[in-house]
Amino acid sequence: MSMLGLEFMRNAFMAGGCIALAAGLVGYFVVLRNQVFTADALGHVAFTGGLGGVLAGLNLLAGVFGSCIAVALAIGALGGRGRGRDIAIGTVFAWVLGVGALFLSLYTTARSAASGTLGVSVLFGSILGLQPAQVVVGSLTGIATAVVLLLIARPLLFLSVDPEVAVARGVPSRALSALFFVLVAVTVAESVQAVGALLIFGLMVTPAAVAQNLSTRPWVGMALSAGIAVAVVWLGLVVAFYIALPASFLITGLAFVLYLASHLARRMSRIGRLA
Amino acid sequence: MPEPGPSWDVVADIQLLLQFHFMQNAFLAGTLVALLAGTAGYFVVLRGQSFAAHMLSQVGFPGAAAGVLVHVSPVLGLIVFCVGAAVGIAAIGREVDAGQRLESAAIGSILAFSLGLGFLFVRLYGGSAQGIYAFLFGTILGITDRDVQLTFAVALVTIASLAAIGRPLMFASVDPDVAQARGVPVRMLSLAFLLILALSVAITVQIVGTLLIFALLVAPAASALQLTARQGRGIALSVALSLAFTWLGLALAYFTNVPVGFFITTLAFVFYLAVRLVKTRRTVVAPA
Amino acid sequence: MRILGALQLDHAAARLGGRLIWTEVDLEVQEGEFVAILGPNGAGKSTLLKALLGVVPLAEGSVRVFGRPVRRGSDEIGYLPQRRRFDPDLRIRAVDLVRLGLDGERWGMSLPSPAKTNRVAEMVELVGAAAYQDRPIGELSGGEQQRILIAQALVSGARMLALDEPLESLDLNNQQAISELIRSICQTRGVTVLLVAHDINPILPFVDRVVYVAGGHVLSGKPQEVIRTETLTALYGTPVEVLHTSDGRIVVVGQYEPVTHHPDDH
């Protein structure tokens, strides 16, 4: 198939698949633990951190990963759950994005005009234009994140649905929460490459929400969430290959359509049960 | 690049600022936006609807892009999409709240989709990176005479409506149960305010952009509410802060060529932080 | 039959946020006893349970469960914390929650295990929750959730149940049904039950003994011995009156009038 004959497509399939695997698994717990807006906030941080990293002469990836992990640890240390409704949080993260806008303008005025698209690719993803190093880093961290998550999945599930009993049964609550925050940060940083800082919800939250609509079995739900995330990324790439639309739009769009369908299916089954 | 830089002569600086037509337009639109955002924002914070404001502004992004795509004003696109979203929220019949996990997952999915859609629209009309940044982070360039006229009309209608429903809205926001018992149409007011909010968001986005809406629509009002519990003073202070942040932000952006959104968010953030710090210190020290 | 000590507190004291909650507590509970822990809000009833779970360390003295010092995560104690209901949108099956009680604290994933599945099914059957075990926990009623949580507390092979206000926010029928369920588990399986309650009446017909926590101290004995005007007045250190209604209910009335006139003021 000519599509897989192209290196950038092979790269996108590999890195995108690994990243989606991690995003689906981590996202399942993000939804379960009601930390959706922590992921959103980290997306904002990733944008500013990434551009800051480039501006400081470092690597974009280094900036994204570093800033996400640092902020995730800070949120974890403050014990905040980062819900979107809080005014203080909203104001802080609007400012973080404002600083990102500053970095962006400093970067574009300092470099040639052609480099002006860097910000767009951080905001909306650049999965079809990954550098070889990004492919390796994205794939490896994706797999590593998934493995670590599966290792802590059972106690994390316990802690997420039933915290008091979990603590009484000896689950190390603080350490586990902090570790999970780091996993969320790493996943956000990876997902920025695939779908961009602004569309992270579409990869981390939407597949997990679909999975929770479809199944109430936690292990089935996790598998579904990861499977759906990988499927929408691959399907989005295939469609993007044949019709020239932005891959990140197609990925989030497909996920959103699935979400609507799963929501309807759940409604229907509930009506069916009541009848 | 604007040529001679700012001096300590304020009058000369203001003359410098307003010598170009685009800056006159930016200041006109900015002033209208600040008046409206300060007033509507007060009720947003009072009613705990800052999250709805955030959501409406992100839905506005594809609206602005669609406006350009079909060759009408982006402000018109913003208005259509924001009002549409407000009607959608009202149709669901519940307050938008990020507290529940599946609800916040649903909202998150919608937000990602709408930002993705906006990105698609920009790509479809072949918009530049700078065009995207303008939608997301605000701009002082490219506000046309028609945009100013539209902004003026919207601001007039919404401020007049707010003035008309102000008192029952305040009652319904602070104490909905009693208000309902006293015959205030709480549900109707809530829909009316949602529409006002949608229009406010739509015109505020042209100055600070989709992503930085908190800086004008929430932060000044939140600071004002921290500083005074009196309603009249609170609204006046909220408007004054919005105006100050907007004017200063526009002036600084003009003289430095850095995006206006950066200055407005920074001013809003620093002021809010200072107010919160002063308040915390006072409450820590005060109780005997 | 030899009666074994299930719980033993010696000169125990607990501190929460720097404040001593209760001191000099000596308490012994026999295996298979159904003990109600009563007392006013904030007296340290929940802290007592947390002390024997090893979640709150004692400031002084010692606590032993089945003859051994306590440790967190023991399979011998099943815990049901005081809580509100699960969120309606928590999309996890009830039976999965019971399963977490069995091995939720271990690392890694849950793999299919017939033995564990059977054990979970047995407990769900025991509490009479089989009909709704596959529904999301958040969609169950308060009484149904309580049954599931009791199954979860028992599933690890617990010989003692530490139940913190399990009857709170249940209607009268469900209070009765859950109390009877706990009594029958206590009798048929020889499980020791420590149940924190703010109202003695729903459980009065079932309990062997009450432990009253008030005024920084603890008093235990048969209900009719402890819940008396003189005993409670001595324990609280302020006048308290115990009334018996015509239908056999017990009401404890505190005298809350503030001291308006103090002789030392003059």
Image (cartoon, rainbow, N blue to C red):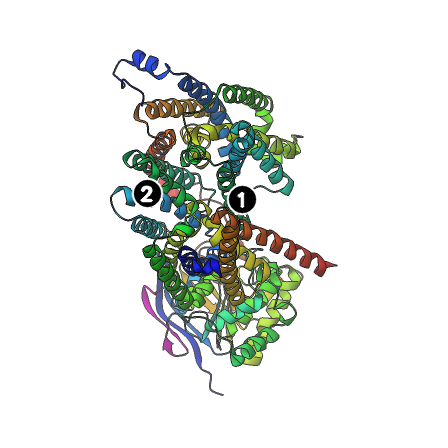
Q: Is residue B79 above or below residue C255?
A: above
Is residue C79 among the parts visible in the rendering?
yes
Q: Quadrant of residue C62?
A: bottom left
> Which residue is at 58% across, 80% downward?
C188
Q: How many marks?
A: 2
Q: For the view shown, which residue lies furthest in the bottom direction?
A: C1
The amino acid pointed to by label 1 is Asp
Q: Label 1 is found on which chain of the structure?
A: B
B121 or A151: nearer the viewer = B121
Magenta stretch containing residue A45, yes or no? no
The amino acid pointed to by label 2 is Leu
Is residue C248 among the parts visible in the rendering?
no
* Direction from residue C185 to residue C2 in the image, left or right: left
> Which residue is at 32% across, 63% downward?
C59
Q: Quadrant of residue A20?
A: bottom left
Write down the region rendered in magenta.
C57-70
Q: Label 2 is found on which chain of the structure?
A: A
Q: Secondary structure at mark 1?
A: loop
Q: Is residue B18 above or below residue B85?
A: above
Disc number placed over residue C242 in the picture, else none = none
Same chain for the residues at labels 2 and 1, yes or no?
no
Mark 1 Cα-neighbour bin, 10 Å: few <14, some 14–19, many ≥20: some
Residue C197 in the image, given as x and y percentages of width and height: 53, 62
Disc number placed over residue B97 in the picture, else none = 1
A242 or A149: nearer the viewer = A242
Magenta stretch containing residue C65, yes or no? yes
Residue B259 in the image, given as x and y percentages of width and height: 36, 30
Judge depth for marks 2 and 1 and give the one in front: 2
Q: Is residue A12 above or below residue B4?
A: below
Mark 2 Cα-neighbour bin, 10 Å: few <14, some 14–19, many ≥20: many
Asked if the residues shown at circle 2 and circle 1 are in contact, with their CB atoms under 8 angstroms apart, the answer is no
> Which residue is at 35% across, 67% downward?
C12
